[in-house]
Image: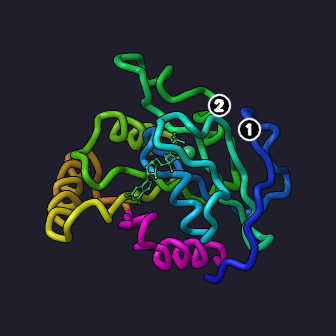
Amino acid sequence: MQIKSAEFLMSNSKVEKCPKDRLPEYAFIGRSNVGKSSLINMLMDRKNLAKTSGRPGKTQLINHFLVNKNWYLVDLPGYGYARVSKSIKRTFQKFITDYFREREQMILAFVLVDCRLEPQPIDLEFMQWMGENGIPFNIIFTKADKLKPMALERNIKAYTAKMLETWEEMPQHFVTSASNYTGRDEVLNYIESLNSN
Ligand code: GTP
Ligand code: MG
């Protein structure tokens, strides 16, 4: 898919206030600092469309970006930052869980995980919650430029093995790097294929 236009539309903390035009949308979620905003900029080939930061907790609201005037990318706040042992309810902010439960035009969520880390309990819990609530998601392994190919492959295999302890199959997944554009075509073409269904 070619990106002809990408524009920031709005930020808010209430799902009722999100755009009402029923265009399909795709959400990016994951732990703070995993690279959600950077990935959105990479996909859109725009440096500062979504605000990024080396400090976790940069994105605080639900941010809608209108792409090619016919679908939305949604940048969400990270979960799991500076919450040591709070319950899931508190860790996943309510407006985020409301967003996923109520947003019918949300076609697919991409759950981002850092390819360098072993499966993190909070990510597994979040995906469990998505599954229990019937919310479709894929996985994106981010920051692939930080690992050599062999190590990357080993980590994805280990992640898959962990997922298969609780899931019947490994969800569809992508490998990306916002630094060198790895995975850009794969993710965009997948979104395009869903948009044209
Ligand atoms: P919050 O909004 O705080 O939840 O974070 P986020 O998930 O949106 O992360 P963000 O895109 O702001 O990136 C966090 C840090 O990781 C920044 O310092 C980025 O430069 C860095 N980063 C993101 N993606 C990549 C990547 O693919 N490769 C490398 N090397 N660094 C990355
Ligand atoms: Mg962000």
Q: CA distance from mark 2 to mark 1?
A: 7 Å
Residue placed furthest toward the right: 21
Q: Is residue 138 above or below residue 89?
A: below
Q: Is residue 182 left or right of residue 73?
A: left
- Three-letter residue code for mark 1: Val
Label 1 packing within 10 angstroms: few (<14), some (14-19), many (20+): some
Q: Quadrant of the N terminus?
A: bottom right
Say how many tags the image has: 2
Observer-nearest of 111 and 42 = 42
Q: Which residue is mark 1?
A: 15
Q: Which residues are magenta?
A: 172-197
Residue under the point 32% across and 63% down:
144
Observer-nearest of 2 and 145 = 145
Q: Is residue 9 above or below residue 100?
A: below
Residue 167 rendering spot, x and y as whole percentages: 29, 50
Observer-nearest of 86 and 16 = 86
Q: Is residue 192 magenta?
A: yes
Q: Is residue 171 left or right of residue 105?
A: left
Instruction: Label 1, secondary structure: give it.
Output: helix
Residue 95 — which label?
A: 2
- Three-letter residue code for mark 2: Phe
Q: Quadrant of the C terminus?
A: bottom right
Residue 26 rendering spot, x and y as whole percentages: 61, 58
Label 2 packing within 10 angstroms: few (<14), some (14-19), many (20+): some
Which image quadrant for residue 155? bottom left
